[in-house]
C-alpha cells in the first residue's frame, strides 16, 4: 500500500523535474461557477507535458534500477501518461515506447514522437493497448510503467495534495477527475492523512463509470463498453490497489456527460483563459451541473488536470 511518508518522499524526489502548479480563484464576471462557496482551481494543466502525469511517472522512473532502464521503458496510455513516460525517457536519455489505442487523439501521438518516443497503435481502448504493452515488456525485459496501479505512480500523484494543503490550508472539499484511479488514489490518501475533515469527491464520465460501478459491486469490474470521448478517463477497469484506496478515502463519486465536460471546458476558456481538455474540465463540470453543490463559505479546490482544446472546440 501507499502512505503519506511515500508521498512526502516522492515530493522531494520529483521537485527538480516537475512544476509546482499555481492556484487561481475562479471568479467569473459573466457566468458564475456556483452561487455558494469559494472556488479555487489547481492548474495541473500547466504541469510539464500539460497534465499531472509526470509526477507519478518521474517518481517511478527515479526508483528503477539501471539495468531495467537500459532496456528501455514502455507503457500504454490514453495520451497524457504516455507523454509523461516520454518525458522521463527524455530526461534519462533512454528509449521509451508508448502504446496508444486507436481512439487517442493524433495530437497526442505527434507530441510523443516529438519527445523521441516510439509510438505503437494497438486496440480500440486503453485496456487492449495495455495488454499489448505488457506482453512486449515481459518478452523484452523492458521497464513497464503502469498509469495508475503502481504504488510509486500513486505516491507521485499524491504530491498534489501536499501543495493544495500548503497553498489552501482552509480547504474543505477537493474535486478530482477519475480515469483508472491513480490520481484520486494519491490525492485522497494524502489529503485524508493531512486533513481528515476534507471531503474528496471523484468525477467520472457517464460513459465510463469504472470506479462507481466497482465500488457498488465491492470488486473490480470490467465495463462491457466505453461511451465517452474523454479518452484519458476511459479504462474499462481499475485495479485492486486503486479500488481499495478509493473505497477507504473518497467520500463520493458523481458522473458527468461529455457535453457537461465540453461546456465546462468552454467556461474555463472564456471565463478563466484556461485551455482544458474534456477530462481536464470534468471536475469543473460537476460544479456547473450542480452535481456538487458547495455550502455557503465552503472552500472548494477543483483540479484542472489536463490541458487541451478538444473541449473548447466540441459542439
Image: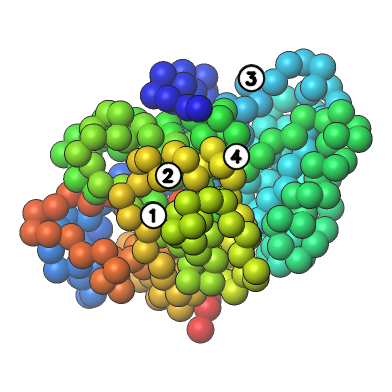
Q: Are marks 2 and 3 in contact (CB under 8 Å)?
A: no
Q: Nearer the viewer, residue 168 or 272?
A: 168
Q: Which residue is mark 1?
A: 202
Q: Quadrant of residue 150?
A: top right
Sequence-earlier tag: 2 or 4: 4
x then y, percent, for residue 87: 67, 37
Determine the CA span between mark 2 and mark 3. 24 Å
Q: Residue at x 62, y 27 (%)?
A: 60
Where disc 3 sits, the SS reads loop
Q: Nearer the viewer, residue 91 or 182?
A: 182
Q: Which label sits in the foreground, 2 or 3?
A: 2
Q: Which label sits in the foreground, 2 or 1?
A: 2
x then y, percent, for residue 44: 44, 46
In the rendered image, the residue lying farthest to the top is 66
Q: Residue at x 45, y 74 (%)?
A: 257
Sequence-earlier tag: 2 or 3: 3
Q: Quadrant of residue 232?
A: bottom right
Q: Which residue is mark 2?
A: 246
Determine the CA span between mark 2 and mark 1. 9 Å
Q: Is residue 162 visible?
A: yes
103 lies left or right of 45: right
Sequence-earlier tag: 2 or 1: 1
Determine the CA span between mark 4 and mark 1. 17 Å
x then y, percent, for residue 62: 63, 21
Determine the CA span between mark 4 and mark 3. 16 Å
Q: Residue at x 82, y 17 (%)?
A: 67
Q: Which residue is mark 3?
A: 63
228 lies left or right of 41: right
Q: Residues within 10 Å of mark 2 (few under 14, many from 20)?
A: many
Determine the CA span between mark 2 and mark 4. 12 Å
Amino acid at each position: 500500500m501507499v502512505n503519506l511518508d511515500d508521498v512526502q518522499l516522492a515530493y522531494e524526489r520529483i521537485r527538480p523535474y516537475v512544476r509546482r502548479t499555481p492556484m487561481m480563484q475562479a471568479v467569473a464576471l459573466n457566468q458564475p461557477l456556483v452561487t455558494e462557496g469559494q472556488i479555487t482551481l489547481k492548474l495541473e494543466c500547466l504541469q510539464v507535458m500539460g497534465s499531472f502525469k509526470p509526477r507519478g511517472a518521474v517518481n517511478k522512473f527515479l526508483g528503477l534500477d539501471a539495468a531495467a532502464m537500459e532496456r528501455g521503458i514502455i507503457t500504454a496510455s490514453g495520451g497524457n501518461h504516455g507523454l509523461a513516460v516520454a518525458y522521463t525517457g527524455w530526461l534519462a536519455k533512454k528509449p521509451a515506447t508508448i502504446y496508444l489505442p486507436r481512439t487517442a487523439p493524433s495530437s497526442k501521438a505527434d507530441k510523443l514522437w516529438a519527445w523521441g518516443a516510439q509510438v505503437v497503435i494497438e486496440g480500440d481502448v486503453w485496456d487492449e493497448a495495455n495488454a499489448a504493452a505488457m506482453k512486449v515488456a515481459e518478452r523484452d525485459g523492458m521497464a513497464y510503467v503502469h498509469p495508475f496501479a503502481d504504488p510509486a505512480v500513486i505516491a507521485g500523484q499524491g504530491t498534489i495534495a501536499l501543495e493544495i494543503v500548503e497553498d489552501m490550508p482552509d480547504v474543505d472539499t477537493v474535486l478530482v477527475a477519475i480515469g483508472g484511479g491513480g490520481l484520486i488514489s494519491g490525492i485522497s490518501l494524502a489529503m485524508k492523512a493531512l486533513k481528515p475533515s476534507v471531503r474528496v469527491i471523484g468525477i467520472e464520465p457517464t460513459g465510463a463509470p469504472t470506479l462507481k460501478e466497482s465500488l457498488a459491486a465491492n470488486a473490480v469490474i470490467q465495463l462491457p463498453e466505453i461511451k465517452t470521448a474523454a479518452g484519458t478517463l476511459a479504462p474499462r477497469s481499475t485495479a485492486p490497489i486503486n479500488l481499495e484506496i478509493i473505497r477507504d478515502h473518497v467520500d463520493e463519486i458523481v458522473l458527468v456527460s461529455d457535453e457537461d465536460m465540453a461546456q465546462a471546458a468552454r467556461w474555463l476558456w472564456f471565463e478563466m483563459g484556461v485551455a482544458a481538455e474534456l477530462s481536464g474540465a470534468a471536475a469543473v463540470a460537476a460544479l456547473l451541473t450542480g452535481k456538487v453543490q458547495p455550502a455557503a463559505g465552503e472552500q472548494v479546490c477543483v483540479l484542472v488536470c489536463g490541458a487541451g482544446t478538444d473541449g473548447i472546440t466540441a459542439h
